[in-house]
Structure formats: C-alpha cells, structure tokens
Amino acid sequence: MKKEALFFKIENDKVRCSLCPHNCLIPKNQKGICGVRECSEVDNQLKLFTINYGEITSVSLDPLKKKPLYHFYPDNNILSIGTFGCNFKCSFCQNYSISQHRADSKYVAVEDMVNITLNQKDSIGLAFTYNEPSIWFEYVYDVAKEVKRKNKEHKIVLVTNGYINEEPLRQLLPYVDAINVDLKGDDEFYRRLCQGTLEPVKNSIKIAHSMGCHVEVTTLVISGENSSNETLISLGDFIASVDRKIVFHISRYFPGYHLNRPMTDINDLKNTYRLLKNKLEYVYVGNVSSEEMAYIDN
C-alpha cells in the first residue's frame, strides 16, 4: 500500500527524505536508496510516499533467541514479520531476496496486524525483522503504538541495522521493548561493503540504551574484512563505553549474495571471542557447532 511518508521536506523540484542518514534527495517518480520511499506529485504538489505500508513478505513464530536476543525473555516465542527494502546494500546480505528486491507481499491493515499480534498463541508480542524495519517506519510506528495502547504487556522488538536518524528513532523507541542492532565493522567496512557509515549506528545504540530499551548487538565476522584486532577492539571498546552488560553476539559468516569469501575461519572467531570477553560481560558465538564452540571457549 502506498501512503504519505513522515520525515521529508521539499527542496526545489525534489523531495529530501530525512528518515535515515542517507538523507536522499529524490526527484519526481524516483525512489531513495532503500527502494521503498518514492517522490510523487499529488494535486500539483510533490510529496514523499512509502510504498510498502502494511506489505508483509515474511511471517513466522520465532524463538527470541533466534533474533538473537539471549537476555530478553529467551525461553519465549514472538510473532515475527518483515516487508521488502533496505537502506543498506550489503554485499553479504543473508536476506537479499526481500531486502534488495521487490518481493511478493500481502497487505495487512494496522488493526488486523494488531489483532493478530494480541491473539497469537505462544507469543509475547511482535518483532519487526527479516529486512530492515526502520524503512518500514510508518507501519512499524502505527502498529507498535496501537499494540501498546491495547496491551502494554505485549513486547515490541526490532532487529535492525541501526541506520536511522535521531528524530524518528526517538519517536519510535517509547513503543519498543528490545532491539538487536547489527554492528558490522569499522567505517571503511560500512562504506565499502554496505554503502553506509558507522557513526549513525553507534548513535542509535547509545540512544536506545539511554531511553531504557533492552539492547543486544550482533557482529557478523568475515575473515579478512572485519576480523582485525584493531576493528574488534574498537567495537568492543565502544560497547563497553555504553554499558559492559550489553550482550554481544558474534555470528559466523557463510558465503552468499555477492560476497564469496570462505566461511569465517574458526580461529578468527576464537580471537574475536577472546578480545570481546576481555571487555564485555556477555559474549556469545553463533552459527558454530558444539564442538567448535568448545574449541573457541578453550
């Protein structure tokens, strides 16, 4: 569904989107880098529209640990939904079929999504995940706000790249209970492999923590790309400066999409774990076998 977007202004014959740090300047009938925010003319006036409002491509009942959220109701399940589009262009994206393409979707109105959430058995709430939820802002905001209005005990979760401007983030966070943020690497890594920058992601983590949202962080470790001691120490120091108790997830990379590097070397995972454990209280490794984890932890 197409709906007028929030966070934009007119600049001459174009629209400036201010939802995320790209701050795209979008000509008429064109879209921003996310692929879902479009400049259109209505009654001789340019406006910005979101084209994925209520458009759901993926839905599942997932364990909270799958997000991953290990210190937020970890033994519970949560209804999880996603749409299409993303404001990053990660060459290693694991969900590129919906993040980088216009996938098939089904429209679900806000009131219907709220009712489904509140009546879903064996679920503590609703998670916006699979693709980047921030570029789905208007729908996420409307649904989250209404869920909380009807039952504040139901939990709202975001699994996000954290690439969102401060104003919309602060508007949304009062209705969000927990987030997992991808902290991908240093600034050079973001620019080269994701078409983004690091500082806005760090700022989102700091803001979410300061506003009382439960925060966990995930880094997908790619050998030779973001596995250097300098990068890992920098990431660990940053998280520790926010709160040493923030949970840090190390995830093993496997080849996919446009990046064909070999899967993460087990010794790089071991080194990452060692470095981060020296700085943070809670560090977990994902996408490894029990035998590999025993080696890493030794």
Image (cartoon, rainbow, N blue to C red):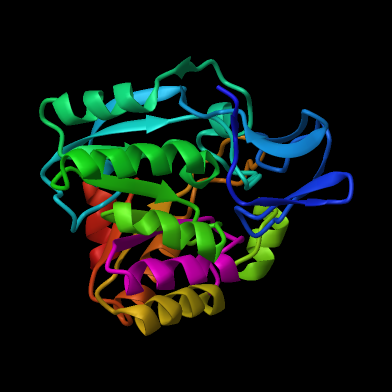
Task: Work out which quarter of the rendered image holds the C terminus and state it.
Answer: bottom left
| 102 vs 203: above or below | above
Question: At which x and y percent is residue 139?
Answer: 45, 36
Residue at horizontal 65%, vertical 44%?
Answer: 91
Question: At which x and y percent is residue 5?
Answer: 60, 40
Q: How many marks?
A: 0
| 17 vs 209: above or below | above
Q: Nearer the viewer, residue 177 or 143?
A: 143
| 240 vs 50: above or below | below
Residue at horizontal 61%, vertical 46%?
Answer: 261
Q: Nearer the viewer, residue 257 or 274?
A: 257
**Quarter assignment of residue 205:** bottom left
Is residue 189 highlighted in magenta? no
Q: Which residues are magenta?
A: 199-228
Of all residues, the one furthest to the right in this rendering is: 13
**Quarter assignment of residue 49:** top right
The reply, left or right, for residue 273 in relation to residue 41 is left
Residue 250 in view here:
no
Q: Nearer the viewer, residue 14 or 190?
A: 14
Residue at horizontal 41%, vertical 24%?
Answer: 58
Is residue 211 highlighted in magenta? yes
The reply, left or right, for residue 126 in relation to residue 254 is left
Residue 6 in view here:
yes
Question: At which x and y percent is residue 177?
Answer: 26, 54
Task: Work out which quarter of the rendered image holds the N terminus and state it.
Answer: top right
Question: At which x and y percent is residue 209?
Answer: 33, 70
The reply, left or right, for residue 228 in relation to residue 18 is left
